[in-house]
Image: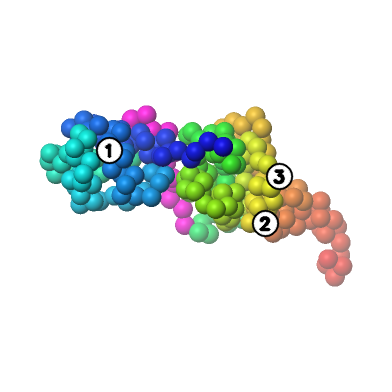
Amino acid sequence: MSEPPLASREAALRIAHAARALNGLDVRAFVGALAERYDLPLTEAKLAAVTVEELRDILAGRHAEANCAVGVELAQLKAAIALFQGQGVSGSDLPAIEPYTEGELPHSIRVGVASNRGEALDGHFGSCERFLIYQVARERIKLIDVRSALEADHAEDKNAARAALVRDCQILYLQSIGGPAAAKVVRAGVHPIKVPQGGAARAVLARLQAQLDAPPPWLARRMGVPAASLSRFAASLAPEEA
């Protein structure tokens, strides 16, 4: 089994941009300094939480001897922090999260998508870099969260840790998943759906969206509503029979 990466692709990209903003620091030394300060893997969420003071302390540490010195202005430190937060990072494929308030999309369903790049359904459960979290209603699809899966790979039970990341979802789309992992996803209350060919996440969700008005039994169970076939049967009964 391959070792989990030190950083997500997005985090590595942000670090590289920040290193250039800090007088062209040696990227390898910079990664080493960050890794010593924060638990691995380095993720975009961890970088976004770094403060100017913390960055100044990191650069003043013993890694200064490896071309990771503090000789930078406050403006450069602030520019690096902005890059850590994803501002102005060219080449980024991290999709933008849409503001969402619980309950604003009535009769909607929460769906996870295993992904590695952009808004693509292109991930395997056990190795995808992130889970895209969508709220899907008949009239709207909103990307409400992006959750890094890399930290889960350091857990004692990797599959259970990954399943916990999507436990608030009713459905999880992925390219593939093994039997033991699928059992843990189901145990978390999530229905895994394999789409081996992958594709654009929103195209896959649009097909799900079209079923919300008259959901088949498997989807109705996840939504907590009567299945389309059952609702048609109930409509044909007299009120007292229903």
Distance from Cα at disc 1 to Cα at disc 3 = 40 Å
Identify the mark at residue 187; answer none if there is no mark: 2
Q: Amino acid at mark 3?
A: Gly
Q: Amino acid at mark 1?
A: Phe
- Residue placed under numbered mark 1 in the picture: 30
Please state if 36 lies on the left or on the right of 104 as rendered. Answer: left
Residue at the image position 86 percent from the left and 65 percent from the top:
238
Q: Is residue 100 magenta?
A: yes
Q: Label 3 crowding class (10 Å Cα cut-off): few <14, some 14-19, many 20+?
A: few
Q: Position of residue 107 (x, y in %)?
A: 61, 55
Q: Position of residue 218 (x, y in %)?
A: 74, 50
Distance from Cα at disc 1 to Cα at disc 2 = 41 Å
> Range of the magenta residues?
87-101
- Residue placed under numbered mark 3 in the picture: 179
Q: Is residue 58 visible?
A: yes
Nearer the observer, disc 1 or disc 3? 1
Q: Regarding mark 3 in the picture, which secondary structure is present there?
A: helix
Q: Nearer the viewer, residue 43 or 157?
A: 157
Q: Quadrant of the N terminus?
A: top right
Q: Amino acid at mark 2?
A: Arg
Considering only order in the chain, which callout, 3 or 1, is on the residue closer to the N terminus? 1
Residue at the image position 23 percent from the left and 47 percent from the top:
58
